[in-house]
């Protein structure tokens, strides 16, 4: 036992050292965001910290960062020792038994009244997303005084005092020095009736792929807008992330949104400003496909904690004069949990890949459908490889199994990490997800300046290229055909298109396209959605109608 503990400690120290080296030498932000995190904790201490519960950076982020720095000061041996693979665990329960247990747990969750939802926090750069989340965690008792003081001291020391609350979420050295979020940060909080998994997304447009990865794991969205003069407008105009994020999350199936109108202290808590922002956003939300009944607004002050949990204290006096509505937590507490398809085959799209604490590779994401248990063999698609689930974790807690709707980390063994990529899907070897190289989709074209032509080259996600063909313009409301083979698809158009995946390398003669795991929307709402990007911009989104090849 003692030897095992020492081994574990050593492995953690080495991992921490490597992480520091990586974060110091990390290259330009765009390249990092676009490249998948793979193998050892490279290219994203943040990704590892935030979705890899076994790494030392989880939970109390600030405190552990300090530990990282302390370890860096020690002159530890950096040579890695060969790891001895343990035999993979065996499945302990029959599939039917897991389903039975899962149903019981979900029923108990429903009865207890505290149900799980995941929430992506979106909005234009610097709107105050991380500050809001950091302060909310503090108000709800998830961050103690010691931690708060450490964040305050640390941020002031590098001249970034105003980011002290954001430090709770922005855990990497680079994020803290630059004062921006670069990758999704995951945390959890509890309201009286909800267990909420928060996915704090980056607001900068260079990190849209990371934001998409968070949004694709979410049931609901919290949009943060900056009420300061000119700032709301900057985020809401063409090219601003307020619009793009809203369209993106809606296209990914998120139907509920809470809008936190932040930084109202900057405009003297003026009701007119709040009303003006709400009246600009409401029609846009409806136009983007959000039902007004599922759209709620709250005025907040993230920095001072006004109207997050309550409106006590002097800072809230000005707001109390005109606002009598719900606090942010009241609204979070009313979020509708998703329905879970636990009897369908397992579909686990990988959102992040990182090295586990000892042997095994961690993959994190949300289970779209089905159940998975420790010891189970899973197939990785695309490709011919499979792996065995060595352990399952959520919130640093080990689980014997996990079901649809849960955001988890699976540690896999009996597989070379080279076969694990962001976007790959884990499924049962006996019930594979279809692989598509040509499919039709019904799309809505975003607010683009250069129209889409037949033959336009697009990217379905951050890693797949394709071409559009055979467009057909549709009526947005009824879905009926308005025009066959239009020359161009302009902004706001609804259309049916055929998309062909291109081979990864165009150089080789006869190179075949690498098909992508996909389902029709009719089969799976989560696996049947596509986002279409061109030159770093999301130009359309839609649902898969048919898989042709
Ligand atoms: N005056 C005022 N400033 C705020 C408030 N909330 C956040 N800020 C400031 O806004 C700046 C940006 O805050 P962040 O929380 O990093 O913003 P963000 O949206 O997470 O930024 P990205 O993730 O990088 O897009 C910081 O300087 C905060 O101190 C607020 O309620 N009032």
Image (cartoon, rainbow, N blue to C red):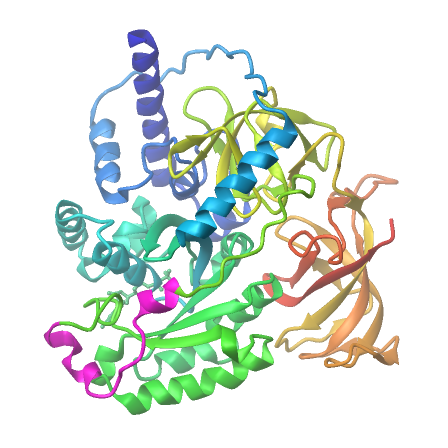
- In x, y percent, where is residue 64? 25, 37
Ligand 1: which quarter?
bottom left
- In x, y percent, where is residue 27? 43, 45
- In x, y percent, where is residue 486? 85, 78
Q: Give the range drawn in magenta.
A: 313-333
On screen, residue 238 above or below 66: below
Query: In this view of the protein, which residue sits in the foreground, 462 or 531?
Result: 531
Task: State the image quarter where residue 423 is shown.
Answer: top right
**Residue with the most extreme left position:** 314
* Number of numbered discs overlaid on the protein picture: 0
Left or right of 246 in this view: 276? left
- In x, y percent, where is residue 138? 22, 55
Q: Residue at x 50, y 73 (%)?
A: 294
Main SS of residues in magenta: helix
Task: State the image quarter where residue 445 is shown.
Answer: bottom right
**Residue with the most extreme front position:** 111
Query: In this view of the protein, which residue sits in the foreground, 396 or 28?
Result: 396
Task: State the image quarter where residue 457 is shown.
Answer: bottom right
**Residue with the most extreme bottom position:** 272
Left or right of 17 in this view: 479? right
For the N terminus, give its image quadrant.
Answer: top left
Q: Is residue 352 visible?
A: no
On screen, residue 152 above or below 357: below
Left or right of 164 in this view: 540? right
Q: Residue at x 26, y 84 (%)?
A: 323
Q: Is residue 435 visible?
A: yes
Query: In this view of the protein, which residue sits in the foreground, 461 or 246?
Result: 246
């Amino acid at each position: 036992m003692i030897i095992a503990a020492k081994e574990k400690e050593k492995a953690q120290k080495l991992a921490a050292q490597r992480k520091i080296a990586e974060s110091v030498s990390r290259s330009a932000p765009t390249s990092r965001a676009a490249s998948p995190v793979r193998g050892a904790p490279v290219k994203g201490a943040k990704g590892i910290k935030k979705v890899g519960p076994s790494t030392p950076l989880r939970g109390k982020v600030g405190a552990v960062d300090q530990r990282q720095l302390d370890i860096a000061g020690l002159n530890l041996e950096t040579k890695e020792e060969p790891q001895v693979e343990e035999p993979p665990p065996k499945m302990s329960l029959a599939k039917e038994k897991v389903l039975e247990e899962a149903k019981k747990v979900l029923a108990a969750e429903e009865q207890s009244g505290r149900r799980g939802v995941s929430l992506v926090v979106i909005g234009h750069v610097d709107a105050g997303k991380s500050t809001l989340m950091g302060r909310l965690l503090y108000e709800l008792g998830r961050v103690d005084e010691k931690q708060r003081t450490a964040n305050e001291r640390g941020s002031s020391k590098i001249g970034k005092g105003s980011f002290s609350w954001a430090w709770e979420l922005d855990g990497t050295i680079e994020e803290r020095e630059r004062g921006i979020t670069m990758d999704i940060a995951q945390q959890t909080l509890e309201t009286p009736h909800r267990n909420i998994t928060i996915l704090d997304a980056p607001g900068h447009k260079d990190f849209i792929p990371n934001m998409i990865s968070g949004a694709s794991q979410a049931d609901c969205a919290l949009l943060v807008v900056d009420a300061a003069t000119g700032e709301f407008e900057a985020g809401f105009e063409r090219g601003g992330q307020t619009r793009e994020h809203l369209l993106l999350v809606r296209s990914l199936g998120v139907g509920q949104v809470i809008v936190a109108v932040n930084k109202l202290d900057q405009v003297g808590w003026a009701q007119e400003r709040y009303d003006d922002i709400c009246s600009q956003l409401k029609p846009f939300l409806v136009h983007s496909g959000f039902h007004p009944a599922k759209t709620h607004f709250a005025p907040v002050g993230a920095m001072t904690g006004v109207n997050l949990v309550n409106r006590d204290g002097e800072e809230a006096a000005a707001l109390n004069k005109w606002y009598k509505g719900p606090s942010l937590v009241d609204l979070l507490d009313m979020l509708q949990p998703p329905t879970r398809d636990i009897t369908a085959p397992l579909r686990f799209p990988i959102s992040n890949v990182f090295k586990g604490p000892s042997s095994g590779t961690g993959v994190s994401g949300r289970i779209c459908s089905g159940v998975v248990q420790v010891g189970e063999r899973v197939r990785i698609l695309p490709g011919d490889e499979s792996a065995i689930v060595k352990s399952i974790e959520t919130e640093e807690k080990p689980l014997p199994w996990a079901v649809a709707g849960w955001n988890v980390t699976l540690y896999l063994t009996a597989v070379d990490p080279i076969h694990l990529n962001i976007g790959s899907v884990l499924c049962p070897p006996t019930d594979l997800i279809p692989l598509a190289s040509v499919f039709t989709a019904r799309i809505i074209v975003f607010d683009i300046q250069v129209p889409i032509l037949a033959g336009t080259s697009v990217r379905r996600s951050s890693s797949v290229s394709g071409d559009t063909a055979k467009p057909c313009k549709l009526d947005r409301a009824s879905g009926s055909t308005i025009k066959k083979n239009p020359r161009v698809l302009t902004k706001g158009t609804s259309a049916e298109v055929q998309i062909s995946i291109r081979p990864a390398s165009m150089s080789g003669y006869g190179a075949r396209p690498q098909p992508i795991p996909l389902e029709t929307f009719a089969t799976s709402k989560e696996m049947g959605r596509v986002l279409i990007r061109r030159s770093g911009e999301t130009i359309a989104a839609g649902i898969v109608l048919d898989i042709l090849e």
